[in-house]
Image (spheres, helix red, strand yellow):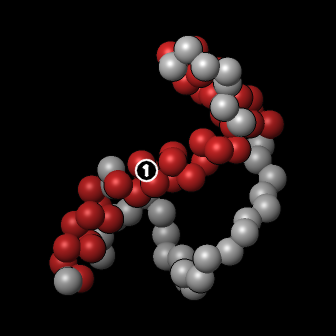
Amino acid sequence: MTKLKLGPIDDDKPVKVTLELPAVLHRDLVAYAEILGRGARQAPTDPTRLIVPMLTRFIATDRGFAKARREKL
């Protein structure tokens, strides 16, 4: 079995997600948004807007996932 960073997840229908984040993770997202804004010389982005790109990047860089996906095809 391929070792992934995440376990199995069922159902891939698009859904609107509401979730509670641990306070420490929210603070990190706020800090990340501030640093990102400073680097782009813009106002800080809403931290919740970082979640989708971060998850997208996480999946794109998960070598175990990429390998398993290639083997599936």
Q: Which amino acid does label 1 sit on?
A: Phe
**Quarter where residue 59 is shown:** bottom left
Instruction: Give the quarter of the figure containing the N terminus.
Output: bottom left
The residue drawn where x is 49% and y is 76% is: 8
**Quarter where residue 48 is shown:** top right
- Percent from the top left, x then y, of residue 63? 27, 56
Q: In this view, does 20 lie to the left or right of 47?
A: right
- Percent from the top left, x then y, of residue 19? 78, 58
What is the secondary structure assignment of the residue under circle 1?
Answer: helix
Q: In this view, does 53 lie above or below 40?
A: below
Q: In this view, does 69 lie to the left or right of 31?
A: left
- Judged from this view, the residue extending furthest toward the front is 42
6 or 37, which lies in front?
Answer: 37
Instruction: Give the quarter of the figure containing the C terminus.
Output: bottom left
The residue drawn where x is 49% and y is 69% is: 7
Can residue 25 be seen at all in this image of the molecule? no
The residue drawn where x is 22% and y is 66% is: 67
Can residue 41 be seen at all in this image of the molecule? yes
Q: Is residue 3 above or below residue 14?
A: above
Tally of marks: 1
From the image, tell me which residue sits under label 1.
58
68 or 38, which lies in front?
Answer: 38
- Percent from the top left, x then y, of residue 16? 72, 69
What is the crowding at mark 1: few (fewer than 14 residues within 10 Å), some, or many (at least 20)?
few
Q: In this view, does 45 lie to the left or right of 72?
A: right
- Percent from the top left, x then y, of residue 10? 56, 83
